[in-house]
Amino acid sequence: MPDDFDFGLLEGALPPIIWRARWNDLADKHGLPFRKGYLQNLDYLGRGPKRFYRRGRVGYRREDVIAWLNQFMSENASSRMIGFGGRGDD
């Protein structure tokens, strides 16, 4: 996926509420980056999209996910180009 991809293009395809339990299904179907486990880790670190809880499940509003993906991918584009370590020794 190009670094300048606009995830807003997926607005019509994604449901209004994205349940974290279904993230992998949506990722496979619509090309969302990451897997559910990585998203959980980002949530734990406070770096994931704005979330809410309903009946013990974690959910995200579509608009929050799209805005977060666009911001997250642009902020991390340079480190992905260099490599995971970010030191340029890969």
Image (cartoon, rainbow, N blue to C red):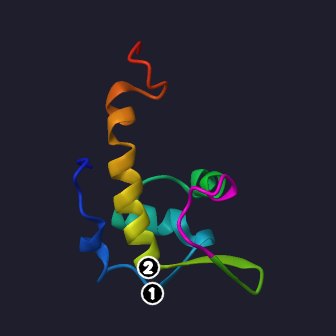
| Nearest the eye: 64 or 58 | 64
Q: Is residue 24 left or right of residue 68?
A: right
Question: Which residues make up the magenta segment?
Answer: 43-51
Q: Quadrant of residue 13?
A: bottom left
| Nearest the eye: 22 or 52 | 52
Q: Quadrant of residue 70?
A: bottom left
The residue indicated by pointer 1 is: 16
The residue indicated by pointer 2 is: 62
Q: Is residue 12 left or right of residue 63?
A: left
Residue 20 placement (x, y as % from top left): 60, 70
Residue 24 placement (x, y as % from top left): 52, 62
Instruction: Name the magenta segment's main secondary structure.
Output: loop
- 48 is within the stretch colored magenta: yes
The answer to whether residue 83 is above or below residue 5 is above
Residue 76 placement (x, y as % from top left): 39, 43
In the picture, the disc for residue 26 is none
- 46 is within the stretch colored magenta: yes
Most distant residue in the top direction: 89
Q: Is residue 46 left or right of residue 13?
A: right
Q: Please report the residue visible at 27 percent of the width from the left and 49 percent of the height from the top.
A: 1
Q: Secondary structure at mark 1?
A: loop
